[in-house]
Each structure stands twice: as C-alpha cells, then as structure tokens.
Image (spheres, rainbow, N blue to C red):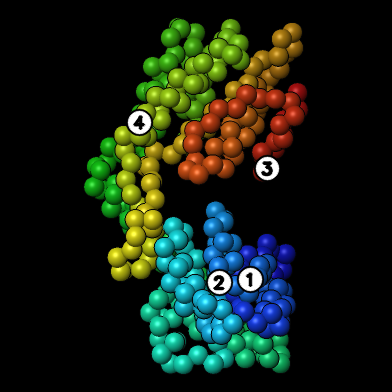
Amino acid sequence: MTGGKERKHILIVDDGVTDLALICERLSSHYEPSVSNRVEDALRLLENTNPYYFVLTDLVMPEQDQNGIDLIRAMRTKPYPVPVIAMSASATPKTIHTATKEGAILLVDKDELKTAQTKEGLQKILAEMEKEVELYHREYADRQKEHQRANYDHLGHAYTDRNILENLGTVIRGNLHRAIDRGYRFGGDEFVVVLPETSAAGALEVAKNIVQQYDSLRSKFTYTRYKSLTPTPVSLETFEQYRPYGSLSVGIAETPSRKEITRERLVEMADIAMYHAKREGKASQPPHSCIKLYEPHLRHPPGREELRE
C-alpha cells in the first residue's frame, strides 16, 4: 500500500477525539485519512462526488444522538459504493449483528487497532481490512458489468459499442456538405473531421450540429442502473440515469494564418483541445458533451509525447 503509490482516501468516524487522533495516526502511513467526530458531519463529507475507499466508524457513540449504526444505515441510500468497516471495544452482540445486517463488511476490535505493539500486529489488522474492502469493490464492479450486459441484452444488440460508433459516423457524414470535406475513423472511439478552407468559427458550427444530433440519440436510450449492493428495497435516490451512449468530446484546431505547420502538429493541437473538452465535460454531473477550441496556453495531455512545430 506504500512504496510510492498514491495513498487511497478513507474516512474515520469516532466521537472520541483522543481515539480518533490515535487511529488516524496509525492508518496515515497506509492511507490518506479524513476524520469526523460527528455522524452528521461525516455524512456531509460523503456527499463528495469522489467517494472514499472505505469508511471506518465506531459503533458506540454515547455522546451523540446518532451512532455508527445510523451512519451505516444512511450510507445505503448513497448512489456510489463506499464499504463500511465497523470498530468497537464495547459493542453488544446485538449491536454487532445489527451492524452486519445493515451492511458493515467487517468488525475490527478497536482496542487491538489502538494498541497493536508491533508493526506486524498492525499490518495483520490492516491486511484483513484491505482484503475485505478489495473484495467489496470487486464484487460491486462485477455486478455493475452484469447489470450493464443485461440492459444491453434487453435493449438489443443495436446499442453495442460498435453500433454506437457506426451511428456517430453517420451523424458526422450527414454534416459534411462539401465535396472537399472528409471524415475519418482515427482508431478506437476517435474520429477526425477535415474541413479545408474553413475558419474555426465555421468548424465550431459543424461541431455544434454533430454534438446536437449525437446527444439527441443519447436522449432516446436512457436506462437506470442499480447502484446498491443491498438486496432489500431502497428509495429511488439509489438509482441514477445511465446512458449506453457516452458523452461526446470535440477539439477544434485551425491552421494559423501565414504559418506552415505539419499535419501531425495540427492533429496534436486538436487532440489537446479534445482532451480539455473531455475534462470539462466529465467534471459536471452528469457528464455532458463538450467542444473546445485550441488555444496556445492549453497544456498537453499527460502520457502523450509532444510534437515540435
């Protein structure tokens, strides 16, 4: 979990400030912890669109109106998967049974976590936690894939990735009105549209038409994706809208006037603009299609070798 890798964010919840600080210190060498000593504050932190790797919560919180069971129960309605590990030094068998029933994936002895005298002892506890958390996330991912395949089967094979790309190609061809205009499949799910003797403003109008028609296709095929692992009935808030058609990201680059550049450089400029369009579109909830014009100050996408003019 260490060794230069980016540490995963976790949330620790405990009404005892001293215990909270000690447990946070113990886990900080393996994870990037956030802390909360109130359940209501923890729930506000969990509104983040980038959820935690897991939540570690005390079950018994005598100084509060809410306890760990209330937190676990409230998290069942969240539209994203965050496993909960419960910890306690004084929970009754009934409380432990309730925590497990409500969705806790593991119960950790709080005193052992606080007082493990050796590195090996702490590592053993953390290894058990990590094993259960990884299993939870793997099972969730597998269930999501199964549900998506079931929806594709229900909708029919007309909405597989291949046919989505074919439909996008049809939309692109329908917006190339001159004999000199060309559209090409660039590999994977990328296309290149070449519009000779066209300004950036003109290319923008073509791009807007393509995006509008593509998004019209998206709006016709919307289905719900179940987001909870719990088999019991839950509220409609646990469903989110999911489209088999992903959002469209478009980058536009124009040949600078009175300046010769290579074809590779022009494609690279459009690629940079597309990268920023994708980032902007995916930053919203839900993600939306986006168009971006190339500008010299835009940074290069990570992992792509930069070409020189």
Residue 111, position as x, y percentages in the image: 62, 91
Mark 4 vs mark 1, CA separation in Å: 44 Å
Can residue 19 be seen here?
Answer: yes
Residue at image location 43% in from the left, 39% down from the top: 246
* Residue 273, quarter of the rendered image: top right
- Amino acid type at circle 1 is Ser
Dot 4 or dot 2, earlier in sequence: 2
For disc 1, the marked residue is 36
The label nearer to you, 4 versus 1, is 1
Mark 2: give few (<14), some (14-19) or many (20+) Cα within 10 Å.
many
Q: Earlier in the sequence, mark 3 or mark 1?
A: 1
Instruction: Give the residue at mark 2.
Output: 39
Q: Determine which of the numbered discs, if any, sits on residue 302 in the image.
A: 3
Q: Is residue 287 above or below residue 44?
A: above
Q: Dot 3: within a 10 Å radius of its alpha carbon, few (fewer than 14), some, or many (20 or more) residues?
A: few
Quadrant location of the N terminus in the rendered image = bottom right
Q: CA distance from mark 3 to mark 2?
A: 39 Å
Q: Amino acid at mark 4?
A: Leu
Q: Residue at x 28, y 53 (%)?
A: 150
Q: Within 10 angstroms of label 1, few (less than 14), some, or many (20 or more) residues? A: some
Q: Determine which residue is flagged by label 4.
A: 217
Left or right of 146 on screen, residue 204: right
